[in-house]
Amino acid sequence: MHPYLLPLYGLLVLTTAWTLSSLFGLYQNYQKARQFGFPIIINAVNFQNPFVVFLGPRVLPSLSRIPFGIGSYFKHISVDWITDDRYKTHQRLGNAISIIDPKWLRIFITDASAIEDVMNRRKDFTKPRVFYQPVEILGPNVDTVEGATWQRHRKITTPPFNERNSALVWKESVRQAQQMLTFWLEQGKSITGTSADTLTLALHVLTAAGFGQEYSFSSNLQAPPAGHQLSYRDALNDVLRGFLPLIICGPDSLSKWYMPKGVKAVGLAVKEFKQYMKEMVTRERQLIEKRDSSNHANLISSLVRASEDGKSASQSLDDDEILGNLFIYNLAGHETTANTLAYVITLLSINPDYQDWIYEEVTQVLQEAGSPETWQYEEVYPRLPRCLATMLETVRLFMSVPSLMKIATDGPQPLTIDDKEYLLPEGTFVVNNFAASHTLPRYWGSDSLHWKPKRWIGTEDNITGMKGFGEIVKEAPVRGCYKPWGEGPRVCPGKKFAQVEFVAVLATLFKEWTVRPQSRPGETSQQTTERVQAVLNDSRLEITLQMRNPTSVGMIWERRSERLQG
Ligand code: HEM
Ligand SMILES: *[C@@H]1O[C@H](CO)[C@@H](O)[C@H](O)[C@H]1NC(C)=O
Ligand SMILES: *[C@@H]1O[C@H](CO)[C@@H](O)[C@H](O)[C@H]1NC(C)=O
């Protein structure tokens, strides 16, 4: 053989081996999937494959357009196929679908009562360790551990999310929203940085209510302080940016040769971030020693104190665990809330009627409450059901977490889907598909894809939520179909934190101001609305769901009184 052919020959052998082992894996998973009798979708490639992760967003859409049915083997591969698909595949194939690839078999479910069941049976359906371990970058934490360890973590990490903390969240959110608005108005007309700015706002609410450090909205956090190579914000951002590859490929492959430079930089960011967290814990311990409890309501303070109070190791967290949990507060609490705010501002910009609707509530309820900085959380927050409804509707369609994967644990687990019981062998992956259950017309009606906050408002009869002026926030139409914050024992502990932040920001922004998208030259207002809608539709899952191209729409803020005159 000619020596130049050697590499080619090697490549051929490798490709053949890869193809054969893929086919074998597919065959095995197909046999496993058949026993359930759900429709089976076959993916040519495993969704964790690094090439899928990095090239997928660019390559998969073209591959899935290959004719003669071949394209369909690529349609459901990416981790976020469900966010575009929503209920469509489930409506076509049923409430449970087996999706197989050469490596995994996953059952996607959208049946409300099955979702409710899976989410509540904490011990029967646990988190798959393989996907959560990478989140232990700084240490084990409440998001990643299971069993008795999880109980210990949860017991110490949940109490900090109390009403005293909510009051702090409220106050800081109002303050940041006011400063953000000032910052926008100072810039002149059209704001394209809404998403970046809500990230800043959410970060500052988190540092204040979470870690006892207040920043003004436009303070420059970019410069690293002495002893640091990165600023706090950059370190956090780089860790978060590198996070999807980290979760999907595992920490060990981050420095492999084929990884882009950016991914390798995550290592430095992790180190820097850890140092910041350690400094905060040290400062908190010094405060405890000095018996200074002025800052008691923030999360880090309660966490460190609760852990110091723990009588024994079985009731407290060690240092790695404290750092791990501080990290998870940052990870879970930052982009989720920030992106939800970016979505709502964009949505409201093309729904002026809903701006009026919110305005009506804010002015009527807060008539005597004075200007935002004097609003008292305890009095004001419970009286703004329209603002909360607006959030519920926003995360219904633009959910930060479009699905949650669980794994059948401790022997085979029975699960009832569509009133029929199935026995899922230990190790079966179950994916709760919220993107579908949040939009299935069977649960939500024929306008299920429309953003309509009013659907959440009821009158006193169907009471469950909080009271405004005669209005209340309703429950979801069917139990189990709406889970933006998860459910059961592992429900998001930051749910109230996020809701209080959202309501405070919304009320502050829309009390006196209105927003509209900037039109392009020659564009009708109808066309502008459609363009903004297209930007909203073009969302993808990074760590959480976000718009791909938010800077392509400019937002114009005007004082309400001026808009009405003009
Ligand atoms: C719009 C905002 C938010 C959304 C949509 C959201 C959603 C979720 C979801 C779906 C889960 C997973 C539940 C499960 O695994 O079963 C979760 C867990 C968690 N969230 Fe949030 N979250 C938000 C804001 C926050 C905030 C502000 C914080 C903290 C400051 C936070 C902290 C956590 C933690 C620590 C967990 C893990 C709990 C456990 O596994 O026991 N989240 N969140
Ligand atoms: C809630 O109350 C409204 C108005 O009274 C009524 O139209 C609606 O059917 C009720 N919804 C439920 C789920 O009971
Ligand atoms: C955006 O998505 C909604 C819901 O699927 C659809 O009705 C609308 O036509 C889409 N708009 C654009 C401009 O893509």
Image: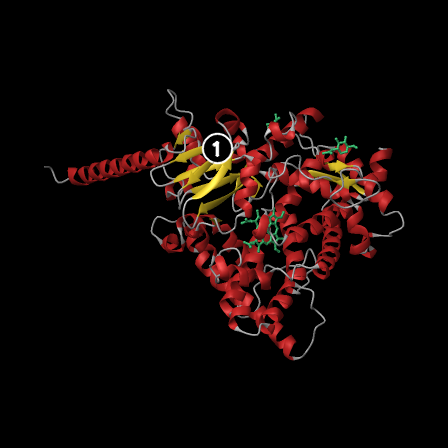
Q: Secondary structure at mark 1?
A: strand
**Residue 304 visible at all:** yes
Find ligand 3 in the image and state its quadrant: top right
Q: Residue furthest top?
A: 68
Residue 498 at x, y = what percent? 66, 50
180 relative position to 150: left or right = right
Residue 57 at x, y = what percent? 45, 37
Amino acid at dot 1: Ala
Q: Residue at x 79, y 55 (%)?
A: 378
Which residue bears the numbered disc 1?
Answer: 96
**Residue 524 visible at all:** no
Q: Is residue 173 above or below residue 354?
A: below
Q: Nearer the viewer, residue 104 or 138?
A: 104
Q: Is residue 5 above or below residue 373?
A: above
Residue 398 at x, y = what percent? 61, 38
236 relative position to 177: left or right = left
